[in-house]
Image (spheres, helix red, strand yellow):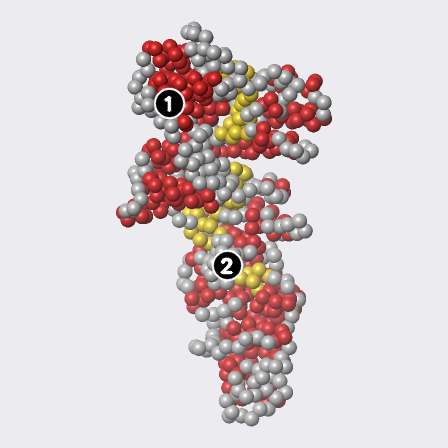
Amino acid sequence: MSRRTKKSDIPAFMRRRFKTPSQGIEPIVRLWLLRMLVPLEAHRGFVDSDELHSDALAREIGLGDWVDGSKAFDYDGIRAELRQRHQEAEDDQANAPLPPILRKNIERFAKLVGLSVADRQILAFAVFIHSEEMLDDVGGWLGGLSTLKLCQVLAVLLDLTKKAVEAALAPQGALASAGLVKLDRDGSLGLRGMLDLLSSSFAEQMLNSDADPVELMRETLVPCSPGLLSLADFGHIAPSLKILRPLLKQAMTTKRKGVNIYLHGEPGTGKNELAKALAQELGSELFEVASQNGDGDPIKGEQRLCAFRAAQSVLSRRRAIVLFDEAEDVFNDGHLFARSTAQTRKAWVNRMLEDNPAPAFWLSNTVGGLDPAFIRRFDMVIKLPVPPRTQREQILRAACGDLVPGSVLTRIAEEEKLAPAVVARAASILHLIRDGLEEITPSAAFERLISNTLEAQGHGPLRLGDPNRLPEIYDTAFLHTDLDLAPVNEGLLRSREGRLCLYGPPGTGKTAYGRWLAERLGMPLRVERASDLLSMWVSGSEKNIARAFQEAGQDGALLLIDELDSFLQDRRQAQRGWEVSLVNEMLTQMEAYPGVFIASTNLMDGLDPAALRRFDLKIKFGFLRPGQATELLRRHCQELALPAPDPEETTRLQRLANLTPGDFAAVRRQHRFRPLENPAGLIAALEAECTLKEGARPAIGFVH
């Protein structure tokens, strides 16, 4: 900068950064600069009474003699030469075309989204003002702009009518609809700030990359990598897939507009993987709207919506699906005193959901807070729960069955919070390091990877010994019930709904049967106990009961509520209002529950008669019959590598009139730290368990 150039007295909005381009500027940019300086009178920020405010600008527009000392400063002379340079540029504008790469890229977008002549010129100018600092600087000398003034400025700069500019910048115009240029009406941002581009790198891509429009949008639209799961891994949502698959297939075939699917569920349940699996089955490309820019900074919700619209425009003629992850960025980003991004632009978002040509997946961890006006515009809203145990084991075996023994995978599959994404990530790491493992086995490494992730998610580490896990020797033949369970099991397998009340002494297998039944039905199991649901607050228990049923229904789970007697006491004996409301809430939820509901209790006396009538079946669980006890003893001896019991030991066992499967489970746990050496020791431990029971009486001889 020469000695004449000073900035200290320039108004705040005029104080811009100045930088001399290394290779000069394009003729079209020089023409725009001169139009700003002369017809639009931005020279007031450039030429002062005794100085020029930018040496670099002076040289670029042909006034270099006034800053390199060849000419003494002359305000009137500079103004006159500035007008002359402007006229020369106007006369020579035929030799000021757009750069070839930019022109070609604009034409590509024009064919895709139908850009008018005015649209193309505005897009070109927006690209340059976001990439040429000098153009941005001189635009700043125009000061604050209203929307009306902006249209007037662009009409002069681009030699367009004001009406054409207004049409091009209208919200329903092609530029805004495609998300390429959005008008920001905050005039304090200046000329550059009011012409908001698709992304921070879009201008650079348009000027330097001779590429397909999708490639030019690579900072906002990212091709998805291949998935790690297949549709076979999503059998737990088969009913929804039976609708979703033909819907997407038909939409792709007929080019139906406005197909939007909202997938929600806890992190890691496989929402991304489901979208990838569906796209692969349909032979479709899958593109994700980016949530962060090239620098790793988060992209605001409104910018992501613009990117979504742009993606819809450029993908309209391709067999493609758009994925919008973290949809809460736009639908749930409000708070108590402010609406969400989507709610503040409700009409715009509604049109976008109704007109998108490419099917779209919107992914979120929750559906809570989503405006009902938006919900009804989604073709399907699907919750992805953690898969049931059988499905988890299938995913585990497919992911790393070649590296980890099946017995280990079966045990890991028992973890009810194990989401598909956790498995997929751990398996990919295990395959990556498999040849370098020296101090740890693949099984141990896999368990450690999964355990660390589960703990970080707040679920606790992977349990190596779940006390609630069904033993490998579990068999419903060891349940002493007053009904044959075989037809009950088959009926539930067919109907997948029913209400069962299981009652009987502790340890007779009620909860274990519920766990086994959930596995047989391929359903997640949700177990709730009195301590989980009862609250000290008014209406708190009722709310907890309603929540338990609601969440179980959303997960398609078998709901088992233990200690039923805490919730369904006879209302005729109630002394407080909340005791009645508690029963009423339980009955209401029971009757409305669409799946399998099991309630268990040790005490049937005092239960509400009307409540008992709501159960389809009431099944009594009793103590083991002698034959059952004998066979269960034999199997435990085999499992613990003990000798087979002799007849005398068998007779001794059969004298235990109050023996339950739970007693065997308790003794088996004791064996971990107090090893049993023979069947006699096992029977002695069982006798001790029976003696401790309330109301236990001495052995009474052989029981038939």
User: Would you name the residue on which mark 1 appears?
Assistant: 473
Q: Amino acid at mark 1?
A: Ile
Tell me, for residue 297, which label it has, or none.
2
Callout 2 secondary element: loop
Mark 2 or mark 1: which comes first in sequence? Answer: 2
456 or 359: nearer the viewer: 456
Q: Quadrant of residue 283?
A: top left
Q: Position of residue 521 (x, y in %)?
A: 45, 25
Compared to residue 448, the image places residue 148 above or below, namely: below
Compared to residue 571, the image places residue 314 above or below, namely: below
Q: Quadrant of residue 214?
A: bottom left
Q: Is residue 480 visible?
A: no
Local crowd at mark 1 within 10 Å, few (<14), some, or many (≥20)? few
Residue plotted at (43% across, 32% down): 466
Compared to residue 492, the image places residue 352 above or below, namely: below
Which quadrant, please, contains the C terminus?
top left
